[in-house]
Image: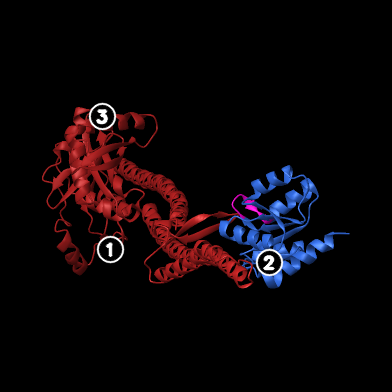
Amino acid sequence: MSDRPWTKRWTFFIGVTLMLALPLAMAYFYFGNLLGQNERNRHQRRLNAQLNSIQEQLYDAKWDAVADTYDDTLQLGWIKEAALLRNTLRGYTYPDGRNFVEGIAVISMKGGLRPTRLAAVIDDEGKPLKAERLSELKKEAPWLENPWLPSYDFVAEAFKVDPKLKNWQSPFIQAPGRIVFVVASARRKLDGSFHSAVILQYSLEGLWRNLQAPTSGELDLWLMDSQGVLGLATTKLAKISANAFLASGMLATVLDNGGKETSQGKLGGAGELEQIIAKEAMRLDFRTLASDMVLGVVTRESQMGTQGAAVLRYLGLISLWALLMLAVAGAIYTVASLREEARMVEKETLQRYAGTISHRVRNDLATAMGNLELISMGRLKSPDRIQETLDNSVIPALADIQDTVEDLERLSRGEVDLAKDGQLGIETMYDVKRSERRGENTT
Amino acid sequence: MSLILIVEDEPAVRQIIGDWLASEGYQVALAPDVEQARAWFAAAPQPPDAALLDIKLPDGNGFMLADFLAEDHGFDRVIFITAFFWEEETRRELVKRGQPYFEKPLKFHQQVLPFLRRFIEKKEP
């Protein structure tokens, strides 16, 4: 029997499975790309918003400090100088003394501190913290009552170098246990020479923790000043990224562009760079605060769009599972269908073979019975003619019947196979293979 | 003397039918398939009194041949013989046509010859 039905069915089954699988795979990759791209765009928009917000906060912090210190320069020499300075400091004090301005002080012409210096040990009402609470806070920040640097002559120096300079932000300075920076406003004499300055000393860590961290999420963020001093790195990756940025020599260029942007009325510069860290592609988004500092956020390229990819991966797995189940069901159906078809083909073959047998035996019987009837009716009188009829017609017909019966017996024992044996109209006839048929291969 | 055309592809069967009819005094013409039967008919000076047509033939079948003879020669004196009466298609066609038929093996003395005699007499005026 032909194996074409098997080939056809399996081809059909594989074809259908592929027709289902291919669009699914194409959709998977298409939507994977689309989702990934959408999520990258969304991520970028969110990151830009966060960076802009932090940039604005830094900008506000600086210019609030500038405004306050400038106001305070007008009060210098007054009898209530200390009380006025305390009012400024109170403006930066969070409840329970968790402020980000460590202190406010007046710097003399030679860079020394005047007695009106005030540290951030007041509460939000301007009163000194209770001793118990102060003691508790000093466990984390021992410098709380005396945050001052040994010398502030760098402030005086800055105002002396530039006679027109009214306010100034220092680079980051390593103080005991933390990094600080200073925003200062100068009071000048009538001839323009430096007289004194009011400073606000910021704790960089305090500024970050109290003002910016709540809105920054889990960013890998760093902050660097114009001298390349790393003031803040929220993670190890952020620190590596900052060092790589510094090593790339881009700091000066980025700050220079930031200064130009500021001169055009913007808060600072903005941009993005590609970084390779430990052979992994990273994306560095940065903002500058004028030309004073750079704020960077580094993101792993592989993690951008991962949420969409994860959703799609689950969807892909579900689709793959469904396809597999469908394929299994299709395979089972195909096998069952082929078996059924094989049974039907087998049945039809046997039916057609039975017809062949019937036809042959009936013709043999017609020959034998016809001749025997001819003899019995006395129509053949000559003994020679009778013998001839028996030899040439009756005996061969009976022998053929015997051969046919033996073929059937061998077929029942599985010793011979059926094969196509011609076509009668639309009917395919089957018989024992000619080479295996009784009487066919004998001489 | 009546003339009978026998169209049968099995030589032994064709021979015994011929022998029987000859022993009854019929004149017999033999053909093994459709083509030779049509050739004989075209060449014959007159149509036979009856034609015994086997249904399964190598180049067609008895029904087809009967249709040819009816269309080409207006001849409808046919008797079918078959070893395929068991087959649904053959049986349905025989019933539909309403023409006489015998199933192999033929019982000459009891069935075929008496019927053939009546069949031929019926034709004669």
Q: Which chain is blue?
A: B
Check contact, mark 1 vs mark 2: CB within 8 A. no
Residue A230 in picture, x, y percent from top left: 19, 43
Judge by depth and name the residue closer to the eye, A349 or B54: B54
Q: Amino acid at mark 1?
A: Asp
At x 31%, y 62%, the residue is A95
* Image quadrant assignment for residue B76: bottom right
| Nearer to the camera, A206 or A99 | A206
Task: Provide the residue designation for mark 2.
Answer: B102
Q: Image quadrant of residue A365?
A: bottom right
Chain containing the residue with disc 2: B
| A280 left or right of B26 in image | left
Q: Is residue B61 magenta?
A: yes
How far across and how far down the image is residue A431, in percent?
48, 61
Picture colour for chain A: red
Disc 1: CA contacts within 10 A as few (<14), some (14-19) or many (>=20): some
Amino acid type shown at disc 2 = Phe
Mark 3 or 1, which is nearer the eye? 3
